[in-house]
Amino acid sequence: MKFIRAHIFGFGKWVDTTFDFTSSSFLTYFGENESGKSTLQQFLSYMLFGLPPRQRQFFQPKHSSRFGGTLRIESALHGEFTIERTAHEFACYLQNGDIKDEAWLHEALHGLTRETYESIYSFSALDLSEIQQMKVQQLNQVLFSVGLTGSTNIYQMEKDLDTQIGQLYKVKGWKSQLNEQLKTVQKKHEQLLKLEKVEHAYSEQK
C-alpha cells in the first residue's frame, strides 16, 4: 500500500490543501512547532480508520465548514483507489467506477488496525528520541520485536511484565507479595509443628 495524494477539505489548520506523495515511498514531513505536522499525521490516520465524533471536534477547522478530505492509495491487489471521508459520509472509489463502503476498506487493509499502523508506519521525532535513551541490549530487543511482530509495544509490555513479576516474587528479600505470603505460610507451618508436638505429648499422657 502506497499513498499517492491527499487532498484536505478541512482538518485542523489545513484547509483546501493538497499533498503529493508520489516522489518517494518513505514520507518525512518536518517544520516548526505548530506548523501542522501532527495534524497531517492525524489526517492520514483519520482517512484510513476514522475518528469518534468527540475527537473529530478537536480537528474541526476554524475557517471552513467542510471537514475531511480524500486520500488516493495504490494497492498491489486493487490498483489505485480513492478514499473520501467527511464528517457524515464515506466512500471508496475504484478505477473501474465501483463505489465501496468502509467494510471493503477494512478488508483491503487486511485487518490493519490503527494501533498497528501507528506502530509500524507512523511515528514522530518524539518516538525516535526515546530510542536514544536506550541501552544496546534494550535497542536490540526493540528491533527484534519490530521484526517479529511489527510493533515496539511488545518491548514495553515485556518491561511492564518484568516489573510486575518483581513485585510478586523475588528470589531474595521479603518485600514482594509472594514472598510475604511464603513467609506467612512458613510461620503457620512452624506453629503447626509445635501444636502437633503438644498434641502428641497430650496423647501419651492420656
Image (cartoon, grey):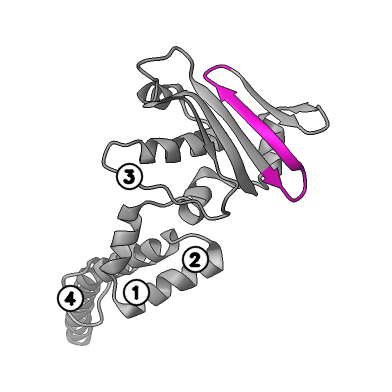
Looking at numbered disc 1 in the image, what kind of residue is underneath it?
Gln
Q: Residues within 10 Å of mark 2 (few under 14, many from 20)?
A: some
Q: Residues within 10 Å of mark 3 (few under 14, many from 20)?
A: few
First reached walking from the N terminus: tag 2 or tag 4: 2
Instruction: Please tell me whether mark 1 sits on a helix, a strand or a loop.
Output: helix
Instruction: Please tell me whether mark 2 sits on a helix, a strand or a loop.
Output: helix
Q: Position of residue 8 (x, y in %)?
A: 50, 27
- Identify the residue position indicated by label 4 in the image: 187
- Identify the residue position indicated by label 3 in the image: 31
Eye-nearest disc, 1 or 3: 3
Q: Residue furthest right?
A: 96
- Identify the residue position indicated by label 2 in the image: 146
Instruction: Give the overall secondary structure of the magenta segment.
Output: strand
Distance from disc 2 to disc 1, alpha carbons, whole Å, reads 13 Å
Distance from disc 2 to disc 4, alpha carbons, whole Å, reads 47 Å
Q: Position of residue 184 (x, y in %)?
A: 20, 71
Q: Position of residue 55 (x, y in %)?
A: 40, 27
Looking at numbered disc 2 in the image, what kind of residue is underneath it?
Val
Indicate whether residue 86 is drawn in magenta. Answer: yes
